[in-house]
Image (tube, rainbow, N blue to C red):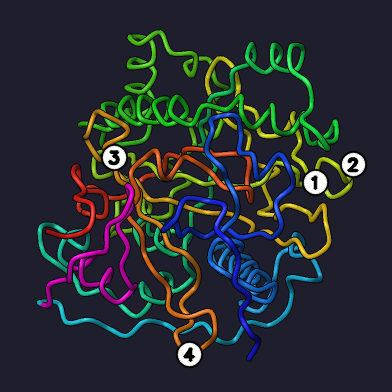
Amino acid sequence: MYKRRRFLAFATVGAVICTAGFTPSVSQAAGSGDGIAKGSYAETHGLTADDVKNINALNERALTLGQPGKPPGELPPSAGASFRAPVDDRETPPAEPLDRMPDPYQAYGGRATTVVNNYIRKWQQAYSHRDGKRQQMTEEQREKLSYGCVGVTWVNSGPYPTNRLAFAFFDENKYKNDLKNTSPRPNETRAEFEGRIAKDSFDEGKGFKRARDVASIMNKALEKAHDEGTYINNLKTELTNNNDALLHEDSRSNFYSALRNTPSFKERDGGNYDPSKMKAVIYSKHFWSGQDQRGPSDKRKYGDPEAFRPNQGTGLVDMSKDRSIPRSPANPGEGWVNFDYGWFGAQTEADADRTTWTHGDHYHAPNSDLGPMHVHESKFRKWSAGYADFDRGSYVITFIPKSWNTAPGEVKQGWP
């Protein structure tokens, strides 16, 4: 068992999410222009390099298991050699009695935290309903949950999140003006400067709003649409009424094919090919932009200013090149976690800052030095604040059956 190192916290005290890294550069320690120092999960909470490698390996393994037709032991090509080490200390949390109420979460600074077993109890009470009846979390669902941050979204969305219908907002004018009118910070390279300016030009609040607006249009189109043709016609009518640029997407676009590509839409106990039985919901993914392993190494270290920008008209982000590759180290001893997921669902709270995002810190390993998985409920500002491990935040629409209650309209942070 390796000995855990301790670090002075650079990030907000008490912030625990599925991101990690070591020794921030000058610009990272200084934050991203908003006055808030954004370090990494590892330096804040004392994770070792082995912890980071194991988290990334499990994230990659979850990605593989979520893709039909791939053997369970196969890792995708994106998993670098350093992340292929076997991970055998993950455990599936035990079952919890259906009638056991959860204990209160520990709340601090816009975030409420609990152990994974207690989250299972809350899920069974508040999120598990099928046709109005509470369900006990199955062993298969607990297995999915055990993967950490992506596990929370996975157990609520049903199929592994594919991120095909993602939205973001990029302020092109701010980006051009800041490149022209500001200079690199002391000891900051040109590549690091351009990556930072690009990161600061994304507005997650506006990206989230765009996803909510589109999900609302989709849900209106789903009403009384008992076949896909009627749904598409309804969708085009709603887009026309809203003068929305998505109306002009190609018929093969991810936007128009999103419903038919959702596995539960085809299942007898899901949508059974009836759009009116489905609803559009939202989750979020944070990740690193510099994923082109054949491109300049500086972009993999400091971010690719051109990568994963949304279409200026529709807000759509082309996620086809997202391989969940983590940020490359710029200095000795650095290591970064490859992604972070947050579940939103279909909350109806109009004020984004009052919405709640459910996510986890790392995979469940109670008998290892990493320890048990924790689940967090963060307010939007806490969720979207970001860490040095990633420079992009996308807001993704997927579909779940209306009979599922994994996406309630109101989520109470913690537990009363």
CB-based contact (under 8 Å), mark 2 and mark 4: no
Quadrant of residue 8 in the image? bottom right
Q: Is residue 48 magenta?
A: no
| Mark drawn on residue 367 | 4
Counting from the top left corner in percent of width and height, residue 54 is at 64, 74
Q: What amino acid is at disc 4? A: Asn
Among numbered discs 1 and 4, the one appearing first in the sequence: 1
Q: Residue at x 89, y 47 (%)?
A: 294
Helix, strand or loop for disc 4: loop
Q: Nearer the viewer, residue 45 or 242?
A: 45
Among numbered discs 3 and 4, the one appearing first in the sequence: 3
Which numbered mark, 2 or 4, is in the foreground of this view? 4
In this rendering, the count of numbered labels is 4
Q: How far apart, in angstroms, are the residues tagged by discs 3 and 4?
A: 34 Å
| Residue 194 falls left or right of residue 9 | right
Q: Nearer the viewer, residue 301 or 250?
A: 301
Q: Which residue is mark 1?
A: 300
Quadrant of residue 104 in the image? bottom left
Q: How far apart, in angstroms, are the residues tagged by discs 3 and 2?
A: 38 Å
Q: Which residue is mark 3?
A: 355
Helix, strand or loop for disc 2: loop
Q: What amino acid is at disc 1? A: Arg
Q: How far apart, in angstroms, are the residues tagged by discs 1 and 4?
A: 34 Å
| Mark drawn on residue 296 | 2
| Residue 224 falls left or right of residue 175 | left
Q: Residue at x 48, y 58 (%)?
A: 17
